[in-house]
Amino acid sequence: MKKTILLAVTGSISAYKAADLTSQLGKLGFNVEVLMTKNATAFITPLTLQSLSKNQVHLDVMKEPDVTVINHIELAKRADLFLVAPATANIIGKLANGIADDVVSTVALALKTEVPKLIAPAMNTYMYQNPITQRNLKILKEVGYTEIDPREALLACGDFGRGALATIEEITKVVLNILSTSEASYEK
């Protein structure tokens, strides 16, 4: 049975890289279910990610495509791994503080504790280095999230520094490592 990865895409300029990430994870045999914040749709269309994932893209926590289930709870139950890529300072703050006001943050709160959770920040260097963002990342790590460190690069804003989304290869490598580790621990 295919493992299901919930890929949460948020409103960063690097949201366009979610297309390549979705494609790569699909080629590796994963079922990719995409969740998008409203701001993410300004950078990449849901249709692109739907075409690549072969699944409906989830945009609205209040939209229930099947009236017999509560969609955000059902999505959380199906997750073998939860991945936020790119993760903005906004979603990091929401997740760290238990704010559930969109499909990404609501599904995140509904995940079982044992589901691996990855977060790949992408933002301006100063936003990433801000003590509030760093505190929020620390909180997320304390509750079981694994950060996929951003790269140092020339950013879209023209600044050079740490804040660029990790490469698709690096993100995929971490996903494979975590899923193989969690699979091994389930077999014990």
Image (cartoon, helix red, strand yellow):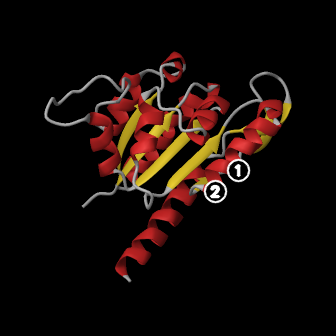
The image quadrant that residue 115 belongs to is bottom left
In the picture as drawn, the residue positioned furthest to the top comes out as 42
Residues 179 and 74: in front is 74
- Residue 15 position (above or below residue 131): above
* Residue drawn at (63%, 29%) of the image: 90
Label 2 sits on a secondary structure element that is helix
Residue count near mark 2 (Cα–Cα under 10 Å), binned few <14, some 14–19, many ≥20:
few
Residues 169 and 33: in front is 33
In the picture as drawn, the residue positioned furthest to the left comes out as 68
- For residue 142, which numbered disc appears in the image? 2
Residue count near mark 1 (Cα–Cα under 10 Å), binned few <14, some 14–19, many ≥20:
some
Find residue 20 and report its horizontal and vertical position in percent: 50, 39
Label 1: which residue? 138
- Residue 74 position (above or below residue 171): above
Please state if 126 lies on the left or on the right of 99 as rendered.
Answer: right
Does residue 172 appear anywhere in the picture?
yes
Image quarter of the C terminus: bottom left
Residues 185 and 98: in front is 98
